[in-house]
Amino acid sequence: MAAGGREWTLTASRLELGGLNYVGVVDSVVNGQVIKVLKFTTSDMKIRDLVQSADASPGYKIVTAARAGSTSTVNRTRLPGQPEPPPLIQLFTVQLKGNLDILGIKIPVDYTAAHPPPLDVPFATFTDVTVRNTDLIGGNLTIPGARISVVSDQAPVDRR
């Protein structure tokens, strides 16, 4: 069971997943409740125009945004004290919604535990993507020009 904790949302203009493997539907704990999520493993992630948000407290969100036009990465990197990097990055996903880009053809997808991906493919590229996650294990996230802010749910939509 994935540790999870709370749900967070990633939006991006482009998401590339290399060395991808769809493991299946697993349990994750979110806000003390067990829910079904999709489990993926990947060797690397590239995220263009990353914006991550999560509830901080009632009425407020923490928003982390990369510099516009930049590509954030998640890589397997050996941390101090580790003999070698983790074998794969594990991603626990409530929903992955966007356009699956296959050779320039964009196919709308909306994957959830109730509607999982029909195929296991070794890599995937998504555009205009929104991903609701509960956990990411085994990778180091690098965000160029990261800006972190706390915003009110009452803030104008372009600031949330």
Image (cartoon, rainbow, N blue to C red):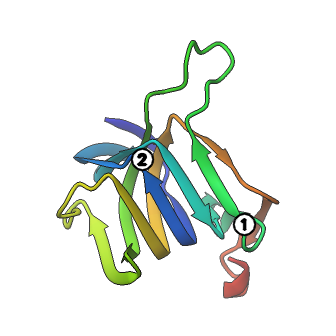
Q: Which mark is residue 70?
A: 1
Left or right for 77, reference 5:
right
Q: Which mark is residue 120?
A: none
Q: Quadrant of the C terminus?
A: bottom right
Give residue 71's position: percent from left, percent from top.
Answer: 67, 62
| Residue 129 vertical placement versus 119 (above, below) | below
Q: Nearer the viewer, mark 2 or mark 1?
A: 1
Give residue 39's position: percent from left, percent from top.
Answer: 32, 47
- Category of crowding for the residue at label 1, using alpha-carbon neighbours closer than 10 angstroms: few (below 14), some (14–19), many (at least 20): some
Q: Nearer the viewer, residue 70 or 148?
A: 70
Residue at image location 23% in from the left, 63% down from the top: 117
Q: Nearer the viewer, residue 149 or 25?
A: 25
Left or right for 5, reference 105:
right
Q: Nearer the viewer, residue 131 or 123?
A: 123
Please state which amino acid type lies under the numbered disc 1.
Ser
Give residue 26's position: percent from left, percent from top.
Answer: 25, 44
Q: Which residue is mark 2?
A: 91
